[in-house]
Amino acid sequence: MNFDFNEDQRALADTVQRFIARDYGFEKRRAIRDAEPGWSREVWQGLADLGVLALNIDEDYGGLGYGPQETGLVMGAFGAGLLLEPYLAGAVIAPALIRRVASANFQEEWLPNIATGESIVVLAHADARRELVTEIGGNLSGRKAVVAHGGCADLLLVSARTARGEMGLFAVISGAEGVQLRDYQTLDGQRAADLVLSNAPAMRLDAGTHDATLEAIDAALDIGLAALCAEAVGIMDATIAATTDYLKTRQQFGQPIGRFQALQHRMADMLLHLEQARSMSYLAAMHCTEKNQAARQRTLSAAKVTIGQACRFIAQNAVQLHGGMGMTDELILSHWFKRLTAIEMTFGDTDFHLQRFAAHLSQASRAA
Amino acid sequence: MDLNFSPEESAFRTEVRNFVSEKLPAHIRDKVMNGVHLNRDDHILWQRTLHQRDWGGPGWPREFGGPGWTPTEQYIFEEECAAAGAPRLISFGLKMIAPVLMAFGTPAQQARFLPRIMAGEEWWCQGYSEPGAGSDLASVKTRAVRVNSTEGDHYIVNGQKTWTTLGQYADWIFCLVRTDPAAKKQSGISFLLIDMKSPGVTVRPIITLDGAHEVNEVWLEEVRVPAANLIGEENKGWTYAKFLLGHERTNIAGIGIAKRELARLKRIAEAEGRLADALFAARVAQVEIDLMALEITNLRVLSAERAKQAPGPEASILKIKGTEIQQAIAELMMQAVGPYALPFGQQDVGPDYAANLGAGYCNLRKLSIFGGSNEIQKNIISQMILGL
């Protein structure tokens, strides 16, 4: 057993942290967020030049062939810097899904372009709002709500019901006729879009059955979930460090407010949440590629519960301990707060995952 | 990063598992599995069984007759013992006074005391807390006055110790005593080993809310203690006391015990049909998830600890979360059986597994109080880790 990162991994983390420190300061991010299209092609190219867009792509397709641990390190650094660009959607989930479902030709065509930053591909699957897309005669019609980074995608991977009532995965060129994307900012400053398809031309990607296709989508989203957990830990690390500093410098009643035990104990509670979250993010990285879906989901649900609860607790209390300053748009703290809030609600919130984990309980106790 | 145990560690786990399954007497196992208090003989029998296998001092280095296990191996050992329903090790001798003797004791003290601890021949208890010295331990008042005489130098000790766990079984007590009342709080304290059979030592039971006799008051009246029983230097006792508290915190998370009790909770909840209740199932799920996370956190601390002697302030994280989890499990077990948690001291009402759940819940409220209350642990975290 060993919890240390190797030399390559530490170098990768350093590179990304340096990039954020040098090229992605908080004011620069603010300017990117406030101008159209709400993300920066130049930054994206910078990430491509660093090689991080190629991280999750096999070497056969121009990638680096790294895994969830390296992705986690990168996501942690992006978390603290509050990256607006579609890294999780475009460079983690999309390649994982394409590798699992698409033909060799399709992989050949798209993966190298994802690695170089030339093409952005995102998955449009989320059906929390129960919006449906159906396929008739090779074309798609219907809606998808709040597709993360849908607006910047060159290609959308759309899950849809086929004429036979099965789940299929289709590739849709975002500029094609019958494709409408209504793009907007989300709470955390990132972008999302509502997708409306009206008899839009599409290419069936999966050769699989209903179950195999759904399983492939779940598998790709689970890799995304592990990456999201690592991002959350990166933000929570930064949030706790900033709040600790604030408690050491802010003076009231003639002393730093960090001398007050009520605040010290709140900080201790925040640290407990953080360390438990960090542990589960390691576990999630380790298990997110496991083939056995039930075992994988059990671990990832446990991770998302731990991390979701930590996100809420740390975000809320960091603002609380900063007092009025915590409420301002001026400090990065409130932006971390909003991203942590969004993360808790992404890929299933705490209640969803707690229930999913609980559903395994009685089976497990009968087996034991 | 690799979260798997090494092949050697896995082989060691199997070895421990086989040993415990072969050697643990069924009557002891049944008590542990059903939350029944163990008596002195149960503990001693198990300690002697371990000693016969040369595992009597699981955390001890080879030079003192221990197996020289790594922190990870100690963790595996305790986890397997707990899972199989073995008694937990009585820490006062093995994990508290023994490391102090090894680090600060004279060769004569080491030779006199250590082998008997390992062999289960002498039972130790802890004389730290006093009525006026709980979390603020350095304010102990028990007085020891040195007397130089021709029949040998000795101390005369007067005072009262309290919350002395299993003191009714003890042969020896290690005590913090005040030898210099004029000195500043921490600097006038010494560390003395006292024979419980000495004239003037009186043990009075304290009955706790669960009806159990687990803790005691120990009164010391004109007790004569040979000066040879002083640890280290006079008035340096606080240093040894803190060293001991550091070692007390090894395996403080209690992962193995919590896993065993969680399995018991699930069996009871299943038998009672409570897992079909979504809210109850979610509560069980929450505690299981917290335990999964704590297990990894514990392994992280162990892995960082390899190079060091005693756990650092991170042990406070383990203490808080570990005790919260064990308390939550006890609470849910009680809740699972509903009204059958209420009969008290009556073994033949309701299902067998319900008999001790109410008392067990009450008893485990101690976990967040002893060994440094969880509030003290939060002070340690905020000061030592966060630097506030």
Image: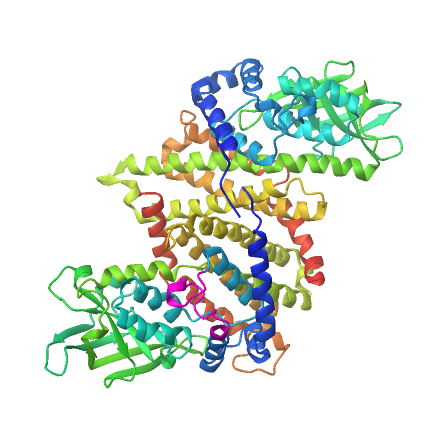
Q: Is residue A365 magenta?
A: no
Which residue is more in the foreground, B365 or B234?
Answer: B234
Q: Locate residue A185 relative to residue A178 in the image: left or right.
A: left
Image height of A311 relative to B155, above or below: above
Residue B371 shows in this picture: yes
Residue extending farthest to the front is: B63
B52 falls in the magenta region: yes
Q: Which residue extends farthest bottom?
A: B199
Majority secondary structure in the magenta region: loop
Quick one: A52 or A21, which is closer to the camera? Answer: A52
Seen in the image, is A205 located left or right of residue A163? left
Q: Nearer the viewer, residue B83 or B262?
A: B83
The magenta segment? B50-68
- Vertical position of residue B271 compared to residue A48: above or below: below
Residue B188 drawn at (x, y percent): 16, 63
Q: Quadrant of the C terminus of chain B?
A: top left
Quadrant position of residue A183: top right
Q: Residue at x 71, y 61 (%)?
A: A367
Where residue A223 sits in the image (x, y, percent)?
64, 36
B189 and A40: which is toward the camera: B189
Viewer can see residue A250: no
Q: Tell me the quarter of the picture where residue B33 sits.
A: bottom right
Quadrant containing the N terminus of chain B in the rendered view: top right
Can you say whether B7 is above or below A203 in the image? below
